Image (cartoon, rainbow, N blue to C red):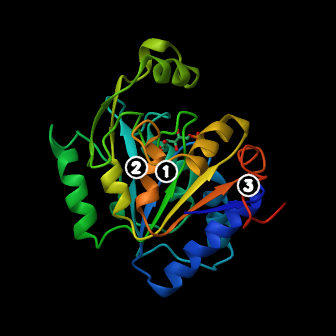
Amino acid sequence: MKFEVWSEEEIGKKIGEEIIELIHRKENAVLGLATGSSPTCVYRYLTEAYRERRVSFAKVTTFNLDEYIGLSPDHPQSYRSFMNRHLFDCVDIDLKNTHLPSIRDGEDAYLHYDKRIEEAGNIDYQILGIGSNGHIAFNEPGTPFDSLTHIVYLKESTISDNARFFASRDEVPVSAVSMGLSSILKAKKIVLIALGKKKKEAIRRLYEDDPSVDLPASALKYHKDVTIYCDPDAASGILSKVKDYARV
Ligand code: F6R
């Protein structure tokens, strides 16, 4: 596991350039995508590169990490509409090739998500964010490392955190579908983005501690190609210990 420290803009550029290079090498690349504030620097960079005609997403397939249960895809807070807004509607991707896990196609449709990823040839490049408690996707502390795509019942604290995006607390979904930790570890290459002071403790634990279900992101230590991109605030608990990092 490699740790790098850059500004948010530089992180967007570095990951964006890696994705562009991957698509140039393999036009039908399979990308694993996240929602939330962390990856938007990458989506901005890719959208700009598309406008400059430096990359085409026409043959690319994507799989998102997670989606709420109970919100229609056109609800402004659904992860589908987030992805459309921040990336899919801004580039030439075929929406048919963009996937989010869902139970809409039948109660057990999410069970087929891992199979669909496998049939697409597995994820070439997976982008992750991290929660302040170390969650990745909706895999909260305690989630087994061998978990596949599954239904998650959101914790009261998560529902309260998310309430700010909705008109009232009652509108916040209480469950979601999420790729599991084992699903994520099948990606060929993984990058995780951590921005801001709120992520400092999770990054310190990820750097210092042995893998444990108490810190879901620590499952990534079992993968051979993972880079953790932090901004200086997120890295502030490890800066003195990381030898191999770029100062911004
Ligand atoms: C989003 C996801 C979440 C976020 C995490 C960090 O698809 O899977 O695990 O990556 O909650 O969110 P931000 O980036 O908003 O701090």
Taking the image as shown, residue 87 lies to the left or right of residue 3, namely: left
View extreme (bottom): residue: 25
Disc 3 versus disc 1: distance between alpha carbons?
29 Å
Residue 168, position as x, y percentages in the image: 51, 13
In this rendering, the answer to whether 61 lies above or below 41 is: below
Q: What element carries label 1?
A: loop
The residue under label 2 is 65
In this rendering, the answer to whether 134 lies above or below 57 is: above
Instruction: State the residue at coordinates (58%, 42%).
Output: 205
Say which quarter of the image contains residue 110.
top left
Residue 48, position as x, y percentages in the image: 68, 66
Residue 68, position as x, y percentages in the image: 37, 34
Q: What element carries label 3?
A: loop
The residue under label 1 is 34
Q: Earlier in the sequence, mark 2 or mark 3?
A: 2
Say which quarter of the image contains residue 94.
bottom left
The residue under label 3 is 241
Which mark is nearer the camera, 2 or 3? 3
Q: Are marks 1 and 2 in contact (CB under 8 Å)?
A: yes
Which mark is nearer the camera, 3 or 1? 3
Say if residue 90 shows up in the picture: yes
Mark 1 lies within 8 Å of ligand 1 (Cβ measured): yes
Residue 189, position as x, y percentages in the image: 46, 69
State how many labels appear.
3
Task: Check disc 2 and give the amino acid type.
Answer: Leu
Mark 2 lies within 8 Å of ligand 1 (Cβ measured): yes
Taking the image as shown, residue 60 lies to the left or right of residue 143, namely: right
